[in-house]
């Protein structure tokens, strides 16, 4: 993890997309994704694209590298204490 990493960490089907949209709006001063942008490209899913993609091609918005993951906490990259994590939990 890098200083500017912003992770959204959720269990699947627990508000991931909703959280991504809200966070994107906050970082982008209320301006939503344009019609030609795809949420899965703006917030790449770590388990699908791998660390090389994140390192070389992840979106940087407002100085944050945007990353989504469904990994359990113990497997989430935590090597940098300056990285930011938004964790969503719900009662099924």
Image (cartoon, rainbow, N blue to C red):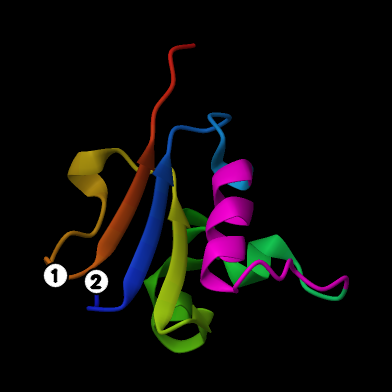
Specify whether residue 23 is painted magenta: yes
Residue 74 location in percent, x, y?
18, 42
Q: Which residue is mark 2?
A: 1
| Residue 37 lies in quadrant | bottom right
User: In the depicted view, which residue is nearer to us: 21 or 16?
Assistant: 21
Looking at the image, residue 81 lies above or below residue 17 = below
Are discs 1 and 2 less than 8 Å apart at CB? yes
Specify whether residue 82 is painted magenta: no
Looking at the image, residue 4 lies above or below residue 39 = below
Q: Residue at x 47, y 82 (%)?
A: 62
Q: Which residue is mark 1?
A: 80
Farthest residue in the right direction?
35
Instruction: State the extent of the magenta-drawn residues as a range.
Output: 18-35
Cα distance between the residues tagged 1 and 2: 5 Å
Q: Residue at x 54, y 63 (%)?
A: 26
- Residue 57, disc: none
Label whose residue precedes the other's in the sequence (1 or 2): 2
| Residue 36 lies in quadrant | bottom right
Residue 11 location in percent, x, y?
44, 32
Q: Residue at x 23, y 67 (%)?
A: 83
Farthest residue in the top direction?
92
User: In the depicted view, which residue is nearer to us: 61 or 42?
Assistant: 61
């Amino acid at each position: 993890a890098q200083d500017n990493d912003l992770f959204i960490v959720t269990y699947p089907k627990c508000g991931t997309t909703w959280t991504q949209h809200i966070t994107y709006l906050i970082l982008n001063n209320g301006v939503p994704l344009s019609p030609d942008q795809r949420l899965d490209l703006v917030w790449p899913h770590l388990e699908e694209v791998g660390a090389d993609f994140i390192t070389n091609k992840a979106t940087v918005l407002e100085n944050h590298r945007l990353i989504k993951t469904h990994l359990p906490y113990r497997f989430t990259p935590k090597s940098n204490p300056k990285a930011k994590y938004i964790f969503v939990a719900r009662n099924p």
